[in-house]
Image (cartoon, rainbow, N blue to C red):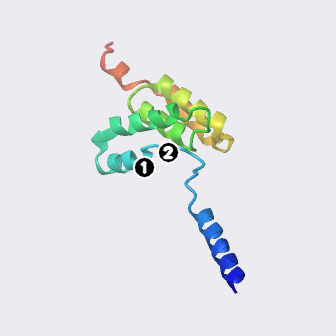
Amino acid sequence: MNTGVSLLVGALIVGLMGCATTNQKYDWGKYDASLYSYYKDPSKEGELSASLAAVINNSKGAKVPPGIYAEYGYLQLQQGKNQEAVASFKQEAAHWPESKVFMAQMIKVASESAPATATHGSSQ
């Protein structure tokens, strides 16, 4: 009877250890909290941008989570940083081939639209 109980307890411990893993496939950093904060208050764009940059910079050879380059590029596009946005969209397409069609469209949009600051100073 003791061996049966010991075997049952051992199996239970092994089973619970499998459920308690903290190994994540991607390091999302503070992305969730900053995205939620940005949705509640769009003026916190800088916080989201810094969070996305941190996720990218802290990847340390690991794969950057899907969509991070694209979202970072979209924020850059909104800020009028078109060349940086194109670079981010290209990174997304390179790391996540399933996004190539969408990223090609975003690259086209970023390449065709002039940065917001360029239209303010021109006069004819």
The N terminus appears in which quarter of the rendering?
bottom right
Which type of secondary structure does the marked residue at label 1 adopt?
helix
**Crowd tier of the residue under label 1, counting other residues whose Cα lies within 10 Å: few below 14, some 14–19, many 20 or above:** few
Residue extending farthest front: 2
**107 sits to left or right of 10:** left
**Crowd tier of the residue under label 2, counting other residues whose Cα lies within 10 Å: few below 14, some 14–19, many 20 or above:** some
**10 sits to left or right of 29:** right
Q: Which of 31 and 41 is in front in this view?
A: 31
Query: Tags 1 and 2 in contact by the CB under 8 Å rule?
Result: yes
Percent x, y for residue 37?
33, 48
Percent x, y for residue 66?
58, 44
**76 sits to left or right of 5:** left
Image height check: is 96 above or below 23? above
Which quadrant holds residue 15?
bottom right
- The amino acid at mark 2 is Trp
Q: Residue 28 carries which label?
A: 2
Q: Residue, x 34% and y 22% (percent of image)?
A: 117
The C terminus appears in which quarter of the rendering?
top left
Q: Which of 80 and 123 is in front in this view?
A: 80
Which quadrant holds residue 119?
top left
Q: Residue, x 49% and y 25% (percent of image)?
A: 84
Image height check: is 111 above or below 103? above
Q: Which of 110 and 26 is in front in this view?
A: 26
- The amino acid at mark 1 is Asp
How far apart marks 1 and 2 lie (CA) works out to: 8 Å
Q: Name the residue under label 1.
A: 32
Percent x, y for residue 52?
45, 37
Percent x, y for residue 76?
43, 31
Image height check: is 24 above or below 91? below
Which type of secondary structure does the marked residue at label 2 adopt?
loop
